[in-house]
Structure formats: structure tokens, C-alpha cells
Image: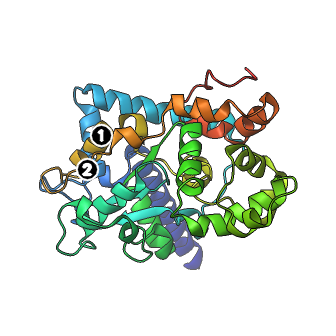
Amino acid sequence: MRKPKVNRMVLAMCLWCFIMVIFYFHSNPKPASAQGSGRSSGQGKSGRSPLQMLYDSDQLEQSAVQVTHQGRRELLEDACRSYTRKRRVLIPEDLKHIIVDDQHGLLYCYVPKVACTNWKRVLMVLTGAAGPHRDPLAIPANEAHVPGNLRTLSEYSTSQINQRLRSYLKFVFVREPFERLVSAYRNKFTRSYNTAFHKRYGTKIIRQHRPDPQAEALERGDDVSFEEFVYYLVDPATQREEPFNEHWERVHTLCHPCLIHYDVVGKYETLEQDSRYVLQLAGVRGQVTFPTSAKSTRTTGDMAAQFFHSISPFYQKKLYNLYHMDFLLFNYSTPEYLKFR
């Protein structure tokens, strides 16, 4: 006779717990680290994590830099809502480009040809992977890209991944898509020292997209034209055979900005200012300085226009369609030099 009463008490307790959980999530809408969870990992001298620093500063009178970054976050969120229909669950393969700094509570999605070598150098200094080096530029460029020097988010367990996505500052740096593409072409196909890329990709591009290639070109693969590179990119067979190389893969495919909420979207065009902002949020501006690049060697919009001059409107349009989402998500205008406009 007592079982029904006991069952009613258990049911009432479960209902009360459920109501309390719902109340908790409705009254705590911010990420975990923005709520003062008391965790020591990733906290700076002020005792607050970079994510807490970001959300705390959002509540105060904002500087021009903070307003800029809030605007970028909102534009990205709006674009994701407008142009992506289906959401899916992240898998470890999606997280291989996200570098983890557990000491400072940072997640960085690296994009090749957007200052990722220098950001890896900075993170090696911050995580201690650089050994005695405190100057990022003292780290050789090839050492910055050695697998294993820095941990990626894909190496963690599911619960560890979720905890870091909730409580760490997530940032990515992006670039005008066609300037990044021309930069990748110049670096990988016009530099004599990049023999690995010439053999791996150059020979294939020449074999598939050059009429009557010479035997030496097929052997060396070191004289790929930009036009042939474009043919290779827009050929549907290319991605059927294998994924794009990371140097010309789209940013939205590398970093999944509609599945991962990035707190800071830095831009190559404002690299130094945005890098200082990230280091300020991390509380490490006195410990490390982001290296400045030699601007004379950068690929500019005018330089990209020169490369696209030889591309027909038909192939310009096909290439633009391929990179269209990067233009939309990161608020880049269609280049004026394109002929199909």
C-alpha cells in the first residue's frame, strides 16, 4: 500500500529537479567561463579567463576595437543563419586545425596563408613548446609546423572537447579569399624551393590541365601557371579524388564557423591590431609580442587583380562560386576586377 505514495514522492522530486535545471539554464545564458566558474586553467593575472575578459568588457563602455569585433561576430552569426540550412554534429576530423593552449584558455583555428606561422610561433612560446625561446621569430618557420609541437582539439576526449569549446576563447584569422588564393599559388608554385608541392601537385596539374605537356614539365612540375591552377581547382574531379590541400581549402571548411562560435574573428587586413586584442584578452601582452610581417612581400588586391587578368569570365565565375561562402561569411565584397560582374 505504501508503493504508490513512494512513487509519487520520487516523481515529485524528479519534477522539482527538472524545473531547477531549466531555471538554471535560462538564468545563465553565457558560456561557462563567463560566469566565474572558479577554474584556474586559462586564467590570467586578473584571475579571469580570456573568455571572461571578453564578455566582461562587452558589458562596459566599448572601445572601437571591441565594437568592431562584436560587429564581426554578429555578421558571421547572421550569415550562418541565412546561408546554412542544416546543422550537424562536429566530429574529430573537424577539429584538426584548432590548436589548444590549456594554460591560457585559448583555441585557435589556423588558416594557412593568414599569418598562421607567426600565430603558431606565439602559441609555442605561450605553451612552453618553444623551450628557451621567448621571441617568436627565433623559432624557425619549419619548426612551427612540426606535428606534435602544439596539441589540436581533435586529440581530446568528447567531454574535454565540449568543456574547452564552452569555456575557452575561440579565435580565427581570415583573409580576402582571392588574395589568400593568389598568395598560396605564389608560395607553393612559383618558389624554386617548394619541390615537394611541385612533385605532389604541380605534376598532376600539368598532366591533367596542360595540352601536350613537355616531358620535363611532367617530371618537375615547377612551372604551373595560375590559369592551370584555377582549372585544377574548379574541376569537379579534383575534390572527388581527394580533399583540397589546406593552403587553398576554404576557411569555412577548415574552421566550421557555423558550427563553432568564434569569439574573435581577426582579419589579415587588420592583423596587428587584432593580434594585440587577442593577446590582451589572454593577459599576455607583456610576455609575448606578435611579430610584424614584411609588407613588401604580401599579396595585395592589386597583385591578385593582375593574376586574374588572364582568367576568362567563365572560369572567374566558377572560382568565385567555389569560394562564395568565405566571401559571405566574413563580409568580403566581390572584387571589382572580376569580369563577370
- At label 2, the amino acid type is Phe
For disc 2, the marked residue is: 290
Q: Of 113 and 12, which appears nearest the observer?
A: 113
* Amino acid of disc 1: Glu
Q: Is residue 299 above or below residue 118?
A: above
Indicate left or right for 154 with 122 as reference: right
Q: Which colour scheme is used?
A: rainbow
Determine the secondary structure under disc 1: helix
Label 2 or label 1, whichever comes before in sequence order? 1
Q: Residue at x 76, y 23 (%)?
A: 340
Left or right: 108, with 105 as reference point: right
Residue drawn at (56%, 72%), measured in percent from left and top? Answer: 7
Quadrant in the picture for the N terminus: bottom right
Q: Mark 1 points at which residue?
A: 272
- Who is closer to the viewer here, 330 or 90? 330
Q: What element carries label 2?
A: loop
Image: 60 above or below 323: above
Viewer-nearest residue: 139 or 205: 205
Vertical comparison of 114 with 136: above or below: above
Mark 2 touching mark 1, by CB under 8 A? yes
- Residue at the image position 46 percent from the left and 56 percent from the top: 110
Q: How far apart are marks 2 and 1 (CA)?
A: 7 Å
Residue 305 occupies which quadrant of the picture?
top right
Which x, y percent locates residue 236?
A: 83, 52
Q: Where is residue 237 in the image (x, y as percent from the top left)?
A: 84, 57
